[in-house]
Amino acid sequence: MAQLNIEETKTNLKAKKFLMWLFLVSSFIYFAGLTSGFIVYTAGSANRGIKTILPEEFMYSTAAIILSSLTMHLAVRAGKGLRFGSQQLFLALTFVLGIVFFVIQWKAWNVLASRGIMFSFNKNASQSFVYVFVWSHLAHILAGLGLIVGAMLGRVRNIAQIRNVFRLEITSIFWHFIDILWIYLYVFLLLNQ
Amino acid sequence: MSSTAKHTTLELHGHHDDHGHHKETFITKYIFSQDHKMIAKQFLVTGIVMAVIGMVLSILFRIQLGWPEKSFPILEAFLGKWAEGGRIKPEFYLALVTIHGTIMVFFVLTTGLSGTFSNLLIPLQLGARDMASPFLNMLSYWLFFISSLIMVGAFFVESGPASAGWTIYPPLSALPTAISGSGLGMTLWLISMVLFIASSLIGSLNYISTVLNMRTKGMDMWKMPLTIWAFFLTAVLGVLSFPVLVAGVVLLIFDRSFGTSFYLSDIVLQGQVLPNEGGSPILFQHLFWFLGHPEVYIIIMPALGITSEVIATNSRKPIFGYHAMVYSLIGIAILSFIVWGHHMFVTGMNPFLGGVFMITTLIIAVPSAVKTFNYLATLWRGNLRFTPAMLFGIGLVSFFISGGLTGVFLGNAALDIPLHDTYFVVAHFHLVMGSAAIFGMLCGVYHWFPKMFGRMMDDKLGYLHFWVTFIGAYLVFFPMHFMGLDGVPRRYYAFTEFAFMKEWLTVNKFISWAAIIAALGQVAFLYNFFHSMFFGKKAVQNPWGSNTMEWTTPVEHLHGNWPGEIPTVYRWPYDYSKPGHHEDFIPQTVPFSETMSSNLPHDFEGNVEAERIQQEWVKTHQAEKV
Ligand code: HEM
Ligand SMILES: [Cu+2]
């Protein structure tokens, strides 16, 4: 009976994990919609386009988020190996790197603004698009931070290992996704600057 | 390690225990329920309420179109300043058509339909205890509920609801001061739709994950009923297209409230030149229709799936061309992403691009036609049982044909240019989408009512409802073709100002009468539905002699669907009237070893051992006969 139950719980967790993958698909489509919109819009006239060099802050933030993917990976490994102390430590590190990413991006758009590249009242909406990309991505970072907190709290409340690993996996799938998503957006912007 | 292992089993055990003695309060059972069957009913009742609201709105604007010069004091009593002097105001007319369209397309035919039947049937027909995530399922319903409240609530704000049409094209929708409906009403529309999309996405994710991960033993993809195939592909379409609408709507919100110019350029509003420059309203149309066209298939595919099931059951015949049905659904799903340009032939699109969209559009007619032929072939020489559900299923086929034909006209850019934005388009989509999908939904309600409520609906009222609605729908929408061919434009407040349109006034009166009578016919349904819920005849376990798994569950609902183990599936769902069997149906859960007299060689899918046993049985059996 207990065996049967574990089986049922496992398929159930598998189905739930799959939900996360599907969510990533829909989220990616959202960004694909935005970037296609950008392309269609920018191709419409020669006056459009980003028309500036991206602030180098974006590069630093990229480094931060790649590093955070690494710590995320280590957290999952620790969790699966029952080394809960390091699991929490690496999760915390990932969290901090996420915040760092956020702050650097903030700096980057201040730099943009200081060059006169505004979100509002801009006749060249290609430049407004840059903000939309960045902000939409940051919204995902916020969600990712929430997941990290959830995973850490789960461990603190000493939930079953099968669920702990589940939370870790969900969090890391999402976190690696927003990492890759940022790289996609960054490369996209670099190619269009 | 051992401590965690113990922990795991303990935890699982605790979880199991509260399955059995779960204390259900009124709130957890009827309101914040996580049971897919209850959530399906919540979606259905909410969908029906929204449908009634949408219908009342349409009667209001039909009154205006039929009797544009007449005053109806009763309207003023109900609508106050929106119908001063008993005549509907032009601004309010636009609000009515906008909200009617939005409610019908999204709230009734997208979520009311998918939400009800995907939730009810995916776990039941696949043999799952519930959805992948019951909690998200509940969340999906409540987001839908709140978004419905906001959409309808827009009628109670000072400046009225959104009025830019269900497609909310900017610049009209992007400039809060453009018309009264672009103000707060438009903001509410956007908020409501964001919640709606969240709800529908969560629902779709759940449906897909459940179909892919939680089928019972033996239920491989090619044994799934066509309903499930349709719901599954519908959910896939939703996941791939709704996020693009989100992108479009996010940019629209920025344009409305944050001074950006994604869609705005060169606008003079009330004598003032606006600062917004450089935007492109066409960009919105691309983003909108990239969702919008898949959306129309999101609406029709579940209805097609439901009718496949109901027509096969009530013809007592295997569905004709099961594989062809699945492949044409897949074909429709893929093609629906590359035809959106046919809504934009008149936007100054490059004629070459228009040609490409024209070809893809005409190709999509092929899988649609395959499905139609397969329905007709299933009916052909069937042992037809005309239950109300069956009649509505046949009604769907009829509307799908008559409305689909005009799609082929509209798909030709050269024909579409004069026909675009005329009543011809209104006729096209009300037949092929509006009427067909509503008939599919009603077909499902009549068929699965016993599964949902454990009671039967009344047949006589069902027949009355069918004939009034069927004839009514044709009388309403068929004449619109001729108006469109004559160039009468859609979304006009009155046709009294242009000489050539005046002659259509009598036709408009006729249509309005037909609409009113058809609307009254719905009372028969509403009474039947709500009355039978409590007082209908008690249903037996499998009232239609059906093969699918939902009819193996007890009539009384239980949490987890099957009292013991979930049954295993052995065969496809369409073994109706199989020669050699003593009954005219064989449920999916009956193994071949119990139906030796009717097994056919191809049933064993190349399993040599099984074929050998079967042959031996046939031999001894024939020996006995001699
Ligand atoms: C046989 C396949 C079909 C073809 C070739 C086709 C073609 C078209 C075309 C070209 C238009 C644009 C007309 C215009 O605005 O000038 C159109 C409009 C429309 N079609 Fe179809 N259609 C088909 C089937 C369907 C189906 C199955 C549905 C829904 C279930 C549907 C729903 C609609 C809707 C809602 C509109 C109008 C949207 C609006 O402007 O408000 N069509 N169709
Ligand atoms: Cu279309």
Image (cartoon, helix red, strand yellow):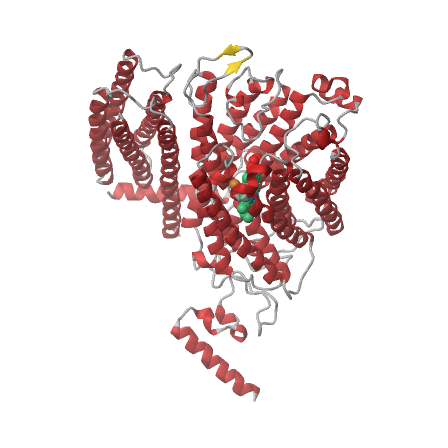
Looking at the rendering, which quadrant does residue A20 occupy? top left
Q: Percent x, y for residue B240?
A: 42, 40
Quadrant assignment for the N terminus of chain B: top left
At x 63%, y 64%, the residue is: B380
Residue B597, compared with residue B521, is above or below; it is below
Direction bottom: furthest residue: B626
Q: Is residue B25 shown to the viewer in this render?
A: no
Q: Percent x, y for residue B326?
A: 48, 55
Q: Percent x, y for residue B165?
A: 58, 28
Quadrant assignment for the C terminus of chain B: bottom right
Residue B96, compared with residue A122, is above or below; it is below
In the displayed structure, does residue A145 sit left or right of residue B141? Answer: left
Q: How many marks?
A: 0
Looking at the rendering, which quadrant does residue B528 occupy? top right
At x 51%, y 72%, the residue is: B599
In the displayed structure, does residue B448 sit left or right of residue A140? Answer: right
Residue B566, compared with residue B505, is above or below; it is below
Q: Is residue B174 shown to the viewer in this render?
A: yes
At x 22%, y 28%, the residue is: A89
Pick whichever, A72 or B398, lies toward us. B398
In the displayed structure, does residue B47 sit left or right of residue B526? Answer: left
Looking at the rendering, which quadrant does residue B236 occupy? top left
Pick whichever, B340 or B565, lies toward us. B340
Pick whichever, A14 or B211, lies toward us. B211
Q: Percent x, y for residue B172?
A: 54, 22
